[in-house]
Amino acid sequence: MAAKSKTQEETRILLGNAAIGRGIVEAGCHVMTSYPGTPSSEILPAVVAFKKELGLDTYIEWSANEKVAFDNALAASMSGKRAAVAMKQVGLNVASDSLMSSAYTGVIGGLVIISCDDPGPHSSQTEQDSRFFGMFAKVPVYDPSTPQEAKEMVKEAFELSETFQIPVILRPSIRISHARQNVKLTPVEKLDRPADFEKDPARWAATPRYRLVLHRRLNETLKQIQERFEKDTRWNYLVEDGDGSSLGIITCSMSFAALMDILEESDLKGIVDVLKIGTPYPLPQRRVADFTREHEKVLVIEETDTVIESQIIDKSNVLGRLTGHVPQEGELLPSVIHNILADFLRENGAAHLEKISDTGLADRIDELELPIRRPTLCPGCPERAAFYAIRKALPKAIYTSDIGCYTLGINLQAVDTVLDMGAGITLASGFYQAYHQDGNDIPIVATMGDSTFYHSGTSSLLSAVYNNARFILVILDNEITAMTGMQPTPGLGVTADGGEGKKVPIEGLIRGCGVTWIRTIDSYEVEELIELLKEAREYTLDPDGGIAVIVARHPCLIQYPEARREISIRVEVTEDCNGCRYCIDYFECPALRLIEEEERIEIDRKYCIDCGVCINVCPRGAIVEAVD
Amino acid sequence: MKNVQIILAGIGGQGILFSSRLIAEWGLRSGLDIMGSETHGMSQRGGSVTAHLKLGSFRSPVIREETADILYSFEENETYKSLKFIKSGGICFANLENENRFDRKVLDLLEQKEITFRTFDASGTALKIGSVMSANIILIGYSVGTGLVPFEYDDLKTVLESITKKAHLETNLKAFEIGYKAGRG
């Protein structure tokens, strides 16, 4: 039985992801799992914060990867508990095997999957639309347009999931995840659900013959959910001030929010009717068909892809991405929606809306050619030191790399490929075999961060070892998941809510994958690392050799300021500097600045943290330890 | 009070997010709805940071070009990049060492759009009081002093007191006061 606790109602300014975390807590969720990734990373920490604030006993874990997170949450749900799993959109690719199958087997306790999309993309390798995963796997999707709505949708998603015994996806886009809004908090539901897994092998271990039965059942369930969404007016509604215009817009999520602000601010309310969709899959088909029938022209504005548009059956008067009226890629920023709306109104003779275009001001600012701040590794970052050494030791190698801060090794010309999590190793192995087949054993250096190695390094590495591949793997171990905001890794032995976990040292995993040549070194020891890399190369060429793994370890200085040099090495640039740019191009430290007029380098003290690594870099020896 | 849209722009480490929180909390206490967003580049330090803040009745967390009422800019290049967001008749408060160095043509274009452009050397002032991190609070104090923004001195000061960590309270209040006095002129 559900019992409501008597906490007072309160309003707080919350980040969208914190609002989602709050929704998870308010729904009485028992188990929350996640793997960090922008824009989803703040959801789990918000659940931890609310758990501590409210004295709850929620089980929370950072899992090794998204599939692991998914399965752990699913098992809790199979035991009758409520469970949530959060990840970024490409994380759902990793968890997709489980998602597809669990749609068939279904759930017992509510299971909510939060997959955060990144149109833009701001911090991802694709602009993929998680709502399509809902369609693909045949599970319902909620699509929030504000943090407040996201919180309420999470709660309803749990209820829907339990009612229909199906996993449910919440798809916030990055602007919802990273919005801040005053959010109304409501009391936390307390659900007493001791784990109670009821054995039913025909369902939970279904063979293909029964899978057909499950699929039929799933299709029936989806029809019932669609009927429920047809009647829903909480998330799917006509905006009231639409007054029978011949033009209609169907929209959702952030695009809906931006459109409504534009109509309001431009005094265009009533010029178009707006149908807002919060449950894009399964689409409430009758509601949408009524809307398209009642309007001469209907424009679909949705992010990131064509989930609503594709599902519309009669598209004869429907405009959108498929007709070229909405850009096929990139984020639908308010300015983009403004211009789409202006064109739509003009083409249909409805109203004049001045387009946002290059004004004199924008032109003039373009002329100023302001410097662009490209993302770069922090001053003193140990990965910079490692990349420099790699490039110096083996300048002709193919450099396969991976996802993390160290992707920025591309700036040091020490990263040639970035595909997805784990591909630093798999591509290295693949390149080796492709060249080796021709009798050509070229140098290959794979780089991978610690968290990425725990995420998906082991299966790649053991497969490469087993198949006799030869390359060098440098694990850049900064003892944290830095890029996404300092989440712990299995190497740390600290759990998601600060408890004690069991440490899983990286070297043991590497050994377990069958590698015998393993060396550990401090990334700051550039000269030694260069020598070690040369040794490693020899080992990959030795008849009795194999894959060589170097663990280049030095803690991230942002997370661990104490990892700075105990005795700082203050550097200065001597008269020997001729402004050749070598240090800028191959070391790229923000503290090294080229003074073009004087053709020399200057140390910017604002940024320099006295790590002294750049002393190794200058070919003329012009960067030296300062004599005070 | 009517709706207000504010942009705060600068680079990492300048306290953009704290400034945004200060104004948002003020809005919440004034009974306004809050909607905002933050964008930061991938780098931890020194990258562009922009906060959009909408007080009043809004749905979207992102401000469109030519609609912001107020721009606070804490760094020169970020000022140039963010000017496009200000509406005709809006205001910009820019942390600038020397206004004479600012592009003349841009200033003319701002004038054509009747945008008020007020500059103050908040960083220099912060350095003088021995707290380089306080330039953000000095510039906000300055804006309150000019009387061109909707926040009253006492109200904003109360919020500042309540959200500042104890260790920084004295410095922040001093910074606010100095900025305010300079703004009053």
Image (cartoon, grey):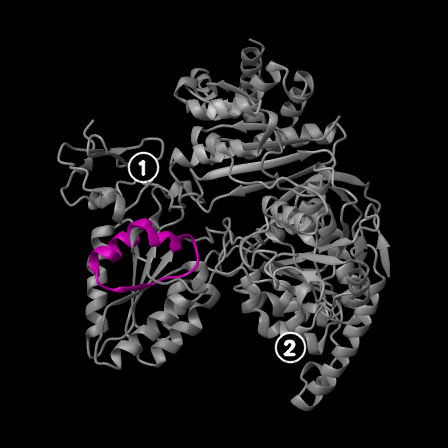
User: Which quadrant: the C terminus of chain A?
Assistant: top left
* Nearer to me, A423 or A331: A331
Q: Which residue was labeled with disc 1? A: A591
Numbered range of the magenta stretch: A384-411
Q: Earlier in the sequence, mark 2 or mark 1?
A: 2
Q: Residues within 10 Å of mark 1 (few under 14, many from 20)?
A: many
Question: What chain does mark 2 sit on?
Answer: A
Q: Is residue A314 above or below residue A522?
A: below
Secondary structure character of the magenta stretch overall: helix
- Mark 2 on the same chain as mark 1: yes
Residue A316 place in picture, x, y as percent: 71, 67
Residue A586 is left or right of residue A209, and the answer is left
Residue A229 is left or right of residue A257, and the answer is right
Residue A322 place in picture, x, y as percent: 61, 64
Residue A522 is left or right of residue B24, and the answer is left
Extreme-top residue of the structure:
B185
Is residue B134 visible in the rendered image? The answer is no
Mark 1: amino acid = Ala
Q: Is residue B141 above or below residue A358?
A: above
Extreme-front residue of the structure:
A349
| Proximity of marks 2 and 1: CB atoms separated by less than 8 Å | no
Name the image quarter holding residue A296.
Answer: bottom right
Question: What chain does mark 1 sit on?
Answer: A
Q: Which residue was labeled with disc 2? A: A101
Q: Is residue A612 above or below residue A575?
A: below
* Nearer to me, A200 or A41: A41
Mark 2: amino acid = Ser
Give the label on residue A379, or none: none
Is residue B76 visible in the rendered image? The answer is yes
Q: Residues within 10 Å of mark 2 (few under 14, many from 20)?
A: some
Callout 1: helix, strand or loop?
Answer: loop
Q: Residue at x 69, y 20 (%)?
A: B155
